[in-house]
Amino acid sequence: MKKLNALFLLCLLFPLTMMASVWDTEYKQVEQSIREPKFPNRTFSITKYGASLKNTAAKNQKAINKAIEACSKAGGGKVIVPAGTWKTGAIRLRSHVNLVIEKNATLFFEFDRNLYPLVETRWEGLDCINYSPLIYAFKETDIAITGEGVIDGNGSDDTWWLMSGKTPKSRDVEVKEKQQNPGGRADLLKMAEEGVPIEKRVFGPWKGLRPQTVNLNQCDGILIEGVKMIRSPFWVMHPLLSKNITVRRVHVENHGPNGDGCDPESCENVLIENCIFDTGDDCIAIKSGRNEDGREGGKGKYVGRPSKNIIIRNC
């Protein structure tokens, strides 16, 4: 009888052991497939391109973007944001650039819609042309946001958050008929279901669709490490249709409406590790488009693009 029991137990454990071995092999394969970007040892300080603590947000925006473009054209390196609070508008990352926000430095994004030009993005899984995310990249290779500084999205009940259509008292209550005042969300959903081309899904001014803090669209080789992100207008980190993504030791504090921490969408080869998320919505949500803009055979421009090979640990 004892021999039968031992044999029965062995028969149970053997498949489980084999499954664990296969899982461990696949895990290591995914981990090893995630390519982390490297950058040349060149530095470009934003102050050398005209940025100043006394400047308006518009002037600093031009200076920071000028430094990024110079760095990229030179073959890449680090663009340095030194200590201090730097008012700015939308920043656009370029290939082979590591935007380094140093300790005691804050990028403070001014609430002025004119500082956020319209770009191609995806909003709650739906393709559209909308306000530029605070930090944006499109079809770039090897980009990074690193350092020990702060990215302040300036979201509050007096700025971006009011565009959600929810009053401060009602933010914890679902108000679907008023969400994204004045109806931009409903309009976008309708356009997507009808197969309207993305070029004609133009939102932005007064349409109520708030920008993400970081949206890296169709990029290969992404690193976000060490920084703290607070008060996002909308989702905080939104890698989109991208691959080889590492998000490490990022601290997110965001209690605004729809304030997701990190939402990889239609992405592959992703590592999110050792992060802290303190949000009023999802900490991490894996997505792959919505309805006609997501599922294979749909009417959208980027359909049938699943998210895959994603590791999340120690968060």
Image (tube, rainbow, N blue to C red):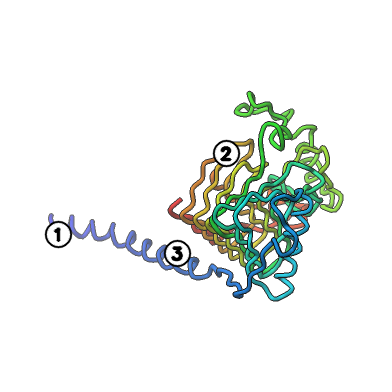
Q: Secondary structure at mark 3?
A: helix
**Going 71% across and 35% down the picture, which residue do you hit?**
159
Q: Residues within 10 Å of mark 3 (few under 14, many from 20)?
A: some
Q: Earlier in the sequence, mark 2 or mark 3?
A: 3
Residue 8, image quadrant:
bottom left
Residue pointed to by mark 2 = 281
Q: Secondary structure at mark 2?
A: loop
Q: CA distance from mark 1 to mark 3?
A: 36 Å
Q: Residues within 10 Å of mark 1 (few under 14, many from 20)?
A: few
Mark whose residue sits in front, 1 or 3: 3
**Which amino acid, mark 2?**
Asp
Callout 2 touching callout 3 (CB < 8 Å): no
**Going 63% across and 67% down the picture, which residue do you hit?**
78
Residue 162: where, in percent of width, then height?
Answer: 71, 32
Q: CA distance from mark 2 to mark 1?
A: 54 Å
Q: Residues within 10 Å of mark 2 (few under 14, many from 20)?
A: some
Tell whether 40 sits left or right of 121.
Answer: left
**Which amino acid, mark 3?**
Tyr
Residue 141, image quadrant:
bottom right
Residue 63: where, in percent of width, then height?
Answer: 75, 59
Residue 215: where, in percent of width, then height?
Answer: 68, 54
- Of 283 and 311, the residue lying toward us: 283
Residue pointed to by mark 3 = 27
State the residue lying farthest toward the left: 2
Whether residue 287 is visible: no
Query: Which label number is shown at residue 3?
Result: 1
- Of 208 and 10, the residue lying toward us: 208
Q: CA distance from mark 2 to mark 3?
A: 28 Å
Mark whose residue sits in front, 2 or 3: 2
Q: Secondary structure at mark 1?
A: helix
Tell whether 130 sits left or right of 229.
Answer: right
State the residue lying farthest toward the right: 200
